[in-house]
Image: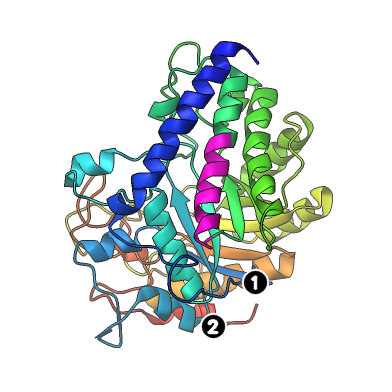
Amino acid sequence: MKKQQLVFILALFFTTMMSFACSDDDNGKPVENGTEGEETEIPELPGFIKGLDLSYVNQVEDHGGIYKQEGVAADPFEILTEKGGNLVRVRLWHNPSWVKDIYGDATPVYSGIADVAATIERAHQNGMAVLLDFHYSDTWADPGHQDVPAAWKNITSLDVLTDSVYNYTYEMLSYLKEKNLLPQMVQIGNETNPGMMTTNTPEGFPDLNVYDGNWSAFGQVVNAGIKAVRDIESQSDSEIKVALHIADPKNLEWWMADVINKGNVHDFEIMGFSYYHIWHTTISFDQLPGLVSDLKSTYGKDLLVMETAYPFTTEYDDNYGNIYSSETAPLEGFPFTIEGQKQYLTTLSQNMANAGAIGVIYWEPAWISSGMKDLWGTGSSWENCALFDFEGNVTEAADYLEVNY
């Protein structure tokens, strides 16, 4: 490694560590697991995952959202645990400073490390395992947006980027380890169909775009993240599963083949994928189990529906336009009703269990309408897909969690 590269990494390391030291105060939600008070027993990954992405709950509650069970205010983590939920997925952004641009400097940095730690603590206290979703971006990462974190924009060396990903992943997990909040599964990248850090890239930034054939570079960076997980795992008393994640089942076969054979990425247990019927139409709902079964047999990796959702209505509860709108047609046999939502989730979960998948995670079932803000509006663009109605009451759709698949 060149001397200037080492200097850059050391500077980045110490700058990042200083930000970690201040992050608890920024979040405003103290994390006591493993540091003060009684330690919570750390759950193991369940045999079949009935997962829930609850990344927005802290923010919704901070801005007036109230969750209820039969009209009585209650903790959504407790509600969904009692229903049968057994895993919480939570996203981590590198430095989402734009949150303070929306709310002001006194605001917790939602989806920053301290906020994530608070979510993990709530999950573990309710007996739910955790999947930590590293986006490696300051904001949403998906097939069309894989923005480079601002802190890494001046990197021009693949080796420096690789070391930065390793150090960042290691330090985030080390922070959680010290608080007895390690996740049971870690996701290296979010919906990484094109690779990672492929959009809004400055001149000279390493090219990780796999659509252009840069599998070797992408694989090197992914392997650095995986190595950080394994190094932390070796220091702990519990196993951490590693997952990769892409969107749309139609991409699974070629992407798995290429990430393994061209990217030389082998040390992962789980291949996760997003399935939303509104966008993912090439592989039909009925064809999905056969595909999952074939891929599990071919590659020896576990398959996991890492994101899915379904509306119970096309009505609105606020002025923030919904993503699943009245222009969206329902799947045959699953009307946009609470019962239809429940049957969709029950059928999908049973189909995945029959196919040998390890579970299904619902994306943002608690993103109800409130005064919370994001980059596009106030409220929720997903309240009609929540497992809570417009009054905040958990609905019968959540009863799909009670089934033993």
Label 1, on which residue?
46
In this rendering, is residue 26 above or below 367? Answer: above
Q: Is residue 192 visible?
A: yes
In this rendering, is residue 47 above or below 232? Answer: below
The residues tagged by marks 1 and 2 sit, at their Cα atoms, a distance apart of 14 Å
In this rendering, is residue 88 above or below 221? Answer: below
Residue at 49% x, 31% y is: 13
**Quadrant into which the N terminus falls:** top right
Residue at 39% x, 45% y is: 21
Identify the mark nearer the N-term, 1 or 2.
1
Q: Is residue 316 visible?
A: no
Q: Nearer the viewer, mark 1 or mark 2?
A: 1
Label 2, on which residue?
402
Alpha-carbon neighbours of circle 2 within 10 Å: few (<14), some, or many (≥20)?
some
Q: Amino acid at mark 2?
A: Glu
Left/right placement of residue 114 relative to residue 298 reads left
Q: Amino acid at mark 1?
A: Pro
Alpha-carbon neighbours of circle 1 within 10 Å: few (<14), some, or many (≥20)?
some
Q: Which residues are magenta?
A: 167-181
